[in-house]
Amino acid sequence: MRKVLITGATSGFGKLLVDAFLANGDFVIATGRNLNSRKELFEIERVKYSRHFLEIDLDVTKPDEIQSAATLVLEKLGQLDIVINNAGFGLFGALEDIKEEEIRYQMEVNFFGTVAVTRAFLPMLRIAKGKIFNFSSVFGFMGFPLTSLYCASKFAVEGLTESLRGELAPHGVQVCLIEPGGYRTNFGKNLSWSLSDPSSIYALQMKNYQMVHEMFSKKKPQEPDEVSRGVLKLSKLKRLPMRKVFGQDGVLSYLMRTFIPSSLYFSILDFYYKKTFLRKI
């Protein structure tokens, strides 16, 4: 029975991943912030999969909680086969308007949290010749206006993961980037909008971006279980790909970024940005 640890398991892709791996017969360690005070989150899993399910209260920005989790897993299970670094959130807004503490927290959760969790569990993963899945995004390979810090955090995860691929390969540990497009999860609801004041030079751009975001969120969305089922399928492969893009929008974005010449690519984006972000209603 494989031992699988999932961060950010309380909602969205994380919760779906918990259910997918449990249904597959794996032992799942679900981690998330304040789990001890939110027992209702895993009521069904706790009963149905009592023999191969473990909950750990874990904030990826707190080193002591990460180390305690690693110690607990080692003591209770003795091994770990897969780590899925899913914990993260989105901070949207103009760079000039974002507060320094918001900037640092974005990087702490999305990037440094991934680093810290990976470091803590690598000794066990080396022994098991295990696998690491790091959640990135389409914004991990393409920049987008008013999402500079979120993009930066995911670009950092991409660089980290690509580098670890060669670093860990001689020790039998494989890594894979998960790059979802837009899916119907609570990511949109949990977005942190660093709103500009009415006098900000970015006020019009922010207003238009929020309107476009709300409009797209009301369209028929892509179902997020496509990602959880996809990650489960990847986990069974003998050899992991470097990256896996999910969603029609994700694949289209990746193809554009990869195969269209840079000058044409940015010309297309500039035209879209001007029509989208600078329109006066």
Image (tube, rainbow, N blue to C red):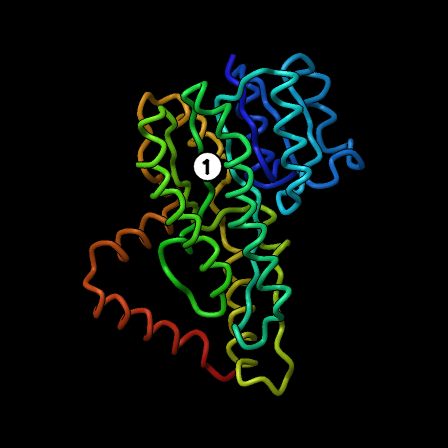
Q: Nearer the viewer, residue 36 or 45?
A: 36
Total numbered labels: 1
- Residue that protrudes farthest toward the bottom in the picture: 199
Image coordinates for residue 109, horizontal then vertical, percent: 58, 50
Compared with residue 197, is residue 266 higher up or lower down, i.e. above or below?
above
Q: Nearer the viewer, residue 211 or 205?
A: 205
Q: Quadrant of residue 77?
A: top right
Circle 1: residue type: Val
Give the residue at mark 1. Answer: 227
Above-or-below relation of 76 to 251 = above
Rendered location of residue 47, percent (x, y): 73, 17
- What residue is shown at x 34% (from left), y 36% (from top)? 167
Q: Residue at x 31, y 25 (%)?
A: 239
What's the residue at 61%, 48% (across, down)?
186
Vertical position of residue 193 compared to residue 127: above or below: below
The local secondary structure at tag 1 comes to helix
